[in-house]
Amino acid sequence: MTVSQPRPAARRPGRPTRLATGAAIGLPTAGVALGVAQIVAVASSRPRSAPVLAVGAAVIDATPRPLKDFAIRQFGTNDKLVLLCGVYLVLAVFAVGLGALTVRRRAAGFAGLAVFVGVGCAAVLSRPASTVVDVLPAVVGGAVAAGALLVQVRSSRTATTTDAARPRLLNRRQFLVTTGAATAVAAASGAGGVVLGRTNAAGSRSRASVRLPAPADPAPALPAGLSDFFTANRDFYRVDTALTVPQIDARTWRLTVRGAVDRPVTVTFDDLLRRPLRERDITLNCVSNEVGGPYVGTARWLGVPLAPLLREAGVRAGADQLVSRSTDGMTIGTPLEAVFDGRDAMLVVGMNGEPLPLEHGFPVRLLVPGLYGYVGACKWLTELEVTTFDAFDPYWVRRGWAERAPVKTASRIDTPRPLTTIAPGTVRIAGVAWAQRRGISAVEVSVDSGQWQPARLADGPSPDTWRQWVHDWDATPGLHTIRVRATDGRGDVQPEARAGTFPDGATGWHTISVTVSA
Ligand SMILES: Nc1nc2c(c(=O)[nH]1)N[C@H]1C(S)=C(S)[C@@H](COP(=O)(O)O)O[C@H]1N2
Ligand SMILES: [Mo]
């Protein structure tokens, strides 16, 4: 028995290291596995069964809240891109290791590949609404990759062992041909998956053919003189856990109302469009929005009032929670009282004069004014279950966020921008303030902790939208701090005390610093 490893002979120049050979074999092999899996997933119209996306989605679900908050803060809407890059990086490291292992011991390499496929299958099966057939892409990808691995490792043997019978150059060439071929298969299947994914995009095609009827109940006229009141669809913040935007064909879409109801009902998209549509201007915001943050927007929404539909189904006594489910397995819990207290809770089909954009929930989303999105605005909606808060904890509640989350009063300074240098003289300080349901009655500004000055408030169409405000300030040279606070329609002043976003929304006065030049 050898106790110490024999020292390896000095590497001969021109001979690849095991790691280099491992990388040359492992990376194309992993690429083949992922590319083939991707194309099978897309071709079978089950994009969610693509293993990389499933792994990413599983990581999102398992990520502890502080880390998730950090990612949202640091990367904003790019958080998913960053996550996918991370997943690919880990995969690449694993692939190089796998290649190196195979060069040394073929069986170990194949065992490693099996682990790789197993992780993919486990991730796919961990997705809500997944079934056994969803592991097919991972398994097919793994099988093709095993073939690619075998071919490559055979040619690498001849390329790296001295073989007097054959000139090394030829062996080297053979190795390059096999790894090159594997790389080409990986690239072609990966690119094919992307292209097919685009053309297969059932949602985009379906959305393009939707014609929305005019509202029976149009939005109240906007007060004169408002500009930039609405947030354009392309600028509207997006917060969700979906790594790929669900592609739903409106013609096959169904919404089921079930649970504690007398008569469960299922409606189609056309059924919804045949009902009288209501149009309303409503401000929506995310509980993860920091003080002064960007996750808030106002749009003109078109939809079907929710309360009549639920009444038709017959909500049973004792129920207090309405759980929305999306096609991608999100669950969102809304207090039933918020649906029935007269506010404009809607099944939304239109946003700013267009069918709902895919990113914002096409074909149908829920919208309940006065609640943060995670408790009232389920996108890609497909089921409404009448139940109780005791009986079911939705996705974010299971992660510690509040069961009930009415929007808190907030105000934001949009201009001047923080930490900029501006000219002295009259400076227009302006922004927005919101307290959906209660409305805004006053906004005040204080410079350098001086007296609170009333800002001028633009009119708003309803208490459910933000109000724009302006305040003219005579700016003198130097460094200045500007603060804003709002008072809601009940006379309650926005609290100064800072609170983080967890568990039910941030509080505190938005404060910025600017330099006024001499
Ligand atoms: N299906 C689904 N619906 C969802 C979410 C989600 O992750 N999945 N996120 C919710 C959250 S946290 C918010 S703030 C709003 C955001 O809606 P928007 O992306 O259209 O602005 O959608 C809500 N609806
Ligand atoms: Mo949110």
Image (tube, rainbow, N blue to C red):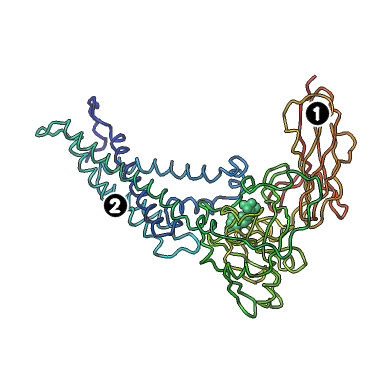
Residue 391: image location, x then y, percent: 63, 70
For numbered disc 1, what is the local secondary structure?
A: strand
> In the current view of this chain or complex, which residue is farthest to the bottom?
262
Looking at the image, which residue is at 82% across and 24% down? 424
Residue in the image at 71% along x and 78% along y: 317
Question: Residue 480: which numbered mark, if any?
Answer: 1
Label 2 sits on a secondary structure element that is: helix
Residue 139: mark: none
Q: Is 313 rendered above or below residue 212?
A: below
x and y, in percent, of residue 492 in the image: 86, 52
Please tell me which of labels 2 and 1 falls first in the chain: 2
Where is the C terminus found, in terms of image quarters? top right
Q: Determine which residue is flagged by label 2.
A: 144
Q: Nearer the viewer, residue 15 or 223?
A: 223
Q: Whole-Å distance between the Cαs marked 2 and 1?
A: 64 Å
Direction from residue 466 to residue 385 in the image, left or right: left
Measuring from the top left, give residue 393's x and y in whole percent.
62, 64
- Decide: is 509 above or below 436: above
Q: Is residue 399 visible?
A: no
Mark 2 neighbour class, 10 Å CA radius: few under 14, some 14 to 19, many 20 or more? some
Residue 247 place in picture, x, y as percent: 50, 57
Please give the name of the residue rendered at 73% of the width and 55% of the height, measured from the top-left corner. 281
